[in-house]
Amino acid sequence: MSDLNKLYKQQVLAHNKNPKNYGEPDHWSHHAEGLNAICGDQVHVYLTIVDDTIQTAHFAGDSCAISMASASMMTELISNKTIFEALHLFASFKQLMSAEGLPNAEQVLGPVACLVSVKKFPSRIKSALLCWYAMNAAINGQATATTE
Amino acid sequence: MLREAFPCLHQQVNGKPLVYFDNAATAMRPQVVIDAVNDYYCHHNANIHRGVHCLSGRATDLYEQARGSLARLINAPSPDNLIFVRGCTEGVNLVAQTFVKERLQPGDEILISHLEHHSNIVPWQIVCQQTGAKLKIIPMNDQGELVLDNLDQLMTERTKFMSVVHVSNALGTINPVKELVQKAHAKNIPVLIDGAQATPHLKVDVQDIGCDFYTVSGHKMYGPTGSGVLYGKAAHLDAMPPYHGGGEMISKVTFEESIYNKVPAKFEAGTPNIAGGIGLGTAAEFIMEVGIEQIGAREADLRQYTEQALNGIEGLRIFGTAKHKSPVFSFNIDGIHPHDIGTIIDHYGVAIRTGHHCTMPIFQFFDVPGSCRASLAFYNTEQEVDILVESLNQAKAMFS
């Protein structure tokens, strides 16, 4: 399989076409906008946090397939996780995307680990990371985040 | 063939022959320009205007010859009408701070258009913040052409300056700059024309256009990056205060005061980009030798071919369909984000730009976050356009 086909693998294309947890929910407690103005990626992350647990996670916005798929998979992964666990997953995902890499990525990140193929396209890493930074900003009470 | 003159075109990327369609971001340089830069460093390396030794004399001559070449390219009355700058951005900022700022009172107006690059918006916003003046915008229509019907209402007695792009970098629209200058001058409004995307494609005659200032970008017209010139009418340049203080721009300095050098040295503080200036002069000579009419005719054919080819792709929408335009195509394809298209077609060797192209207001008008932009030059070919179309079809297939 070529690097391009690994980047746009079926999981990514499927999440892009039919994203999970997409759209602004009626109720949420935490929100932040991730915006990469230069490349045109925008991801709003909406969290409902009760007693330190993320009960629901949603996202909305207009983004490239990598950013959409990443956000879709992230919202599935962090739902019903504690804030501590979500922030730990954020750290793990950043490590996966870094030169260092993440051992046992599938064990730690589940399906999200498939985004490791983005690393072959350095200009796209910021697209994959945007929703995670927006999630982190929402938890910390910040309105916006960017990875540019 | 002229394509052979551009060495960087002849390579493979991702295992495919390079198709370079990002000329509006920066053009390729012909070998003669690369040689001129190399020749300066290898044989004439010296500072200019200040040494008595042989090399300094040679370097000064080459630099001033370059100014002369650029003056001929845009038909300036004299080389002294041209100030070497880093590019159009610096040219616009220079005019904003040294010519326009002192003319502004709170409530005065500066007129720009909806088609401007950020570099012809932000310097005016800064000067507005400094003075309390306001920006007014000439609107555009769905084709990406300026709407001039209400120009008389937009040009009021408070309008102190107008700055308009000659050719839009995002849509390719060629604006009727001569008509705009005539209308502005009828109301005593001085005008700057941003020519970044014009000199590589069109015959530019600053005396015929009649503008007060005109900016030229080196790297868009096959010259080195970080080079450019600002054209100004002599009376304006003589009256304007310096932009930067330093060496070269003075004729005498004491601790009490400094006496400024004459134009253009007054605006050229510090050791300039000598190699860049020499390379830019060579690029101007290259354009004149090839002939801007030939370049224009070749690009008109390419534009027509590309337009037809892109219109044949289902779900593709072109932004900017002005009657008069350069070979620039902004487009989106239904259901695929521009960023993904850029990555996929790069895999097939095709280099385009994706995003807002430093013209966010244009894409706010079209209500999209950005576009794909294929910008062609005379050295591109119909076969390359076919490769673009094939790679776009591959992207569509992948996302179907």
Image (tube, coloured by chain):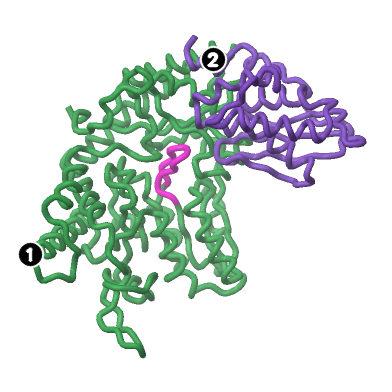
Chain colours: A purple, B green
Q: Picture quarter containing residue B182?
A: bottom left
Judging by the rendered image, the residue that carries numbered circle 1 is B54
The residue positioned 37% from the left and 16% from the top of the image is: B386
* Residue A65 shows in this picture: no
Left-right relation of A44 to A6: right
Considering every residue shown, the one lying at the far top of the view is: A1
What chain does badge 2 belong to? A
Q: Nearer the viewer, residue A70 or B120?
A: A70
Residue plotted at (40% across, 59% down):
B90
Label 2: state its secondary structure: helix
- The kind of secondary structure the magenta stretch mainly shows is loop
**Percent position (x, y) of residue B175?**
42, 46
Q: Give the range drawn in magenta.
A: B165-175
Q: Report the amino acid beneath label 2.
A: Lys
Above or below, A85 against B67 in this view is above
Dot 1: element: helix
User: Residue at (30%, 42%) from the top-left corner?
Assistant: B200
The residue that mark 2 highlights is A6
Q: Among all residues in the image, which is located at the extreme right? A: A51
**Label 2 to label 1, Cα distance in Å?**
60 Å
- Residue at 50%, 32% (x, y): give it: B354
Q: Nearer the viewer, residue B186 or B14?
A: B14
Task: Relative to B44, say whether A39 is above or below.
Answer: above
Same chain shared by disc 2 and disc 1: no
Find the residue positioned furthest to the front.
Answer: A103
Three-letter residue code for mark 1: Cys
